Image (cartoon, rainbow, N blue to C red):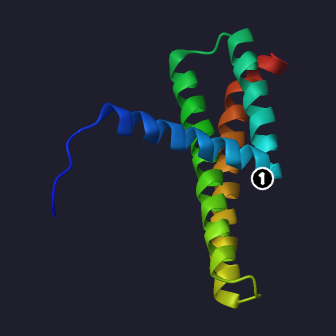
Amino acid sequence: MERRRFSWKERGNSFSYAWQGIKGLLLTEHNSWIHLGLTLLVIPLAIYYRITRLEWMFLIIVMAMVWAAELFNTALEKSMDFISKENHPQIKLVKDLAAAAVLISALAALAVGAIIFIPRILG
């Protein structure tokens, strides 16, 4: 196998493809708008309450985890739809498992957000 030379242009293209993926997610998946809305709510809230650096790290990690899970979920769903439009128990299971990953990551993000913000809001 021939090794290709490093190319800044190809690296730049890879970032462009990634942004196209994010754009595609936002244009096709309604749940991504919920994630976007909550992300745009949490960031100003964190700034307002002047959360600590450690709290910022936790928020960034869980927000990224939710976004990544949603992207993987969408990629799997689109792949399964490409394979077959028919109802198939194995395809349903794959889609359900991917959706469960989004749910678990969202619940973890909710828990982290509650731990960080509830004492500040109530206190």
User: Which quadrant of the structure image shows residue 72?
Assistant: bottom right
In the image, residue 18 sits, relative to residue 73, either above or below, namely above
Give the farthest residue toward the left.
2
* Residue 48 x/y as whole percent: 74, 10
In the image, residue 16 sits, relative to residue 51, either above or below, namely below
Pick the front one: 7 or 92: 7
SS for callout 1: helix
Q: Is residue 7 visible?
A: yes
Q: What residue did someone put label 1 on?
A: 28
In the image, residue 95 sits, relative to residue 111, either above or below, namely below
In the image, residue 88 sits, relative to residue 93, either above or below, namely below
- Three-letter code, disc 1: Thr
Pick the front one: 71 or 78: 78
Left or right? Give the position of 14 relative to 34. left
Tell me how many marks there are: 1
Q: Quadrant of the C terminus?
A: top right
Q: Is residue 118 visible?
A: no
Task: Write the residue at 67% across / 56% down.
Answer: 102
User: Which quadrant of the structure image shows residue 47?
Assistant: top right
Task: Write the residue at 44% across / 41% down.
Answer: 14
* Residue 92 x/y as whole percent: 71, 81
Left or right? Give the position of 51 relative to 54. right
Task: Write the residue at 51% across / 22% down.
Answer: 54
Pick the front one: 62 or 88: 88
